[in-house]
Amino acid sequence: MIGSDERNSTTQEVADELRRRSAFVMVSHVKPDGDTLGAGLALGIALKRLGKRVAYFQQDPVPRNLRFLPDTSFVSREVPADFPPDALYVFCDMSDYTRAGEFLPKIDRANMLDIDHHLGNSHFGAFNFVIPSECSTGTVVVHLLRELGVEIDREIATCLLTTIMTDTGGFMHSNTTPEVLELSAELIRAGADKEEITEEIFANKRVAATRLLGRVIDEMTFAHDGRYCYSFVDDRMLAETRADGEDTEDVVNVLRSQEYVEVAALFKDIEGELRVSLRSNGRVNVQAAAKRLGGGGHFRASGLTYHGSLKDAFAAVESALVAEGL
Ligand code: AMP
Ligand code: MN
Ligand code: MN
């Protein structure tokens, strides 16, 4: 139930706060995906329709496959200098504000709203609206739009359907409930172009990305009777295939979808940072495994940043997964 977590504000309390403030900064997480950005854009556009001032803060550039979304030309790694001190910073799709990156200016907790669907969200805001049962942060935002009485027009619907299609893997993951499909139908009726979204976020693969995928597949290792599959990407592989970090996004799902594989891990050792993506078929809780190493996420999809060598990361992640029942 919405608001049943006592650390959450109610839908009405959050809507009242949104009505009360005049300026907003929508904040998305580093290495942005269609959920963090789409949720912020949907709510940002809705607030503009209500006459509010809205800016979008995102440390990293808008990924190529999300540039089709409305308002992305306003996304910046700076907050406009003339923004009022009581602007509300709306963090979308992150279990802690640190996921917004180190470029984010220091913000009083009183000016933080945390909208999310991750397990283990730290409830870092003065206002928290966290619903882990929702498939995307975008569908959490829908509760607020309904409370505010904002019409879901074509632009907002496009952003919202993008959040759903991103976080359900194009309606394939287990979070694709009948309610999600009903809402998606409503969004398509409101003008969201499902075919365009599919094409933009799932097709359009660069040849470099496919070459990189080939290299990652060559490096696949299977363990635990074939239940665990892992591989890695490093700077050399990127240079040799002319791919970049954005081209690694879906690769971990290929590893998870191999026969008998229950848990997959992709180690991304890129530009001095080692990020690990974990995926599960639903038996092992990879959010709990990631949390052991300082990361987080969802039961079936999680991630972490590892401080150490690739070899040590392989061992540490495997131990964490074993501790969670691999
Ligand atoms: P990814 O593998 O990057 O697609 O991330 C999968 C899930 O794990 C997403 O829900 C992320 O928000 C979460 N996640 C990834 N990296 C981290 C991290 N370093 N700390 C907390 N959560 C993370
Ligand atoms: Mn996300
Ligand atoms: Mn999400």
Image: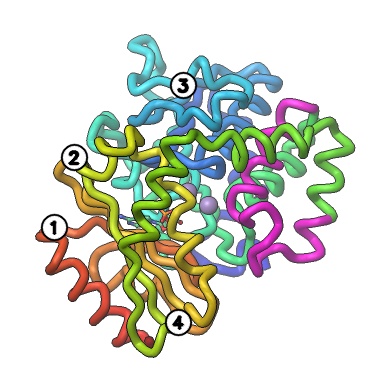
Q: Which residue is mark 3?
A: 75
Q: Which residue is mark 1?
A: 307
Q: Position of residue 46 (x, y in %)?
A: 68, 28
Q: Is residue 110 above or below residue 51?
A: below
Q: Position of residue 56 (x, y in %)?
A: 47, 25
Q: Which residue does the image show at 66% across and 48% down from the upper left?
A: 165
Q: Mark 2 and mark 1: span between their CA atoms?
A: 13 Å
Looking at the rendering, the stretch of residues picked out in magenta corresponds to 154-181
Q: Is residue 276 something one can see in this rendering?
A: yes
Quadrant position of residue 292 = bottom left
Please indicate whether residue 293 sits to the left or right of residue 280 in the image. Answer: left
Q: Nearer the viewer, residue 46 or 186?
A: 186
Which quarter of the rendering shows the C terminus? bottom left
- Tell me the SS state at disc 4: loop
Which mark sits nearer the N-terminus, 3 or 1?
3
Q: Is residue 300 above or below residue 193?
A: below
Q: How many marks?
A: 4
Q: Is residue 174 above or below residue 10?
A: below
Which mark sits nearer the N-terminus, 1 or 4?
4
Residue 215 on the magenta segment = no
- Tell me the SS state at disc 1: loop
Tell us which disc is closer to us: 2 or 4. 2
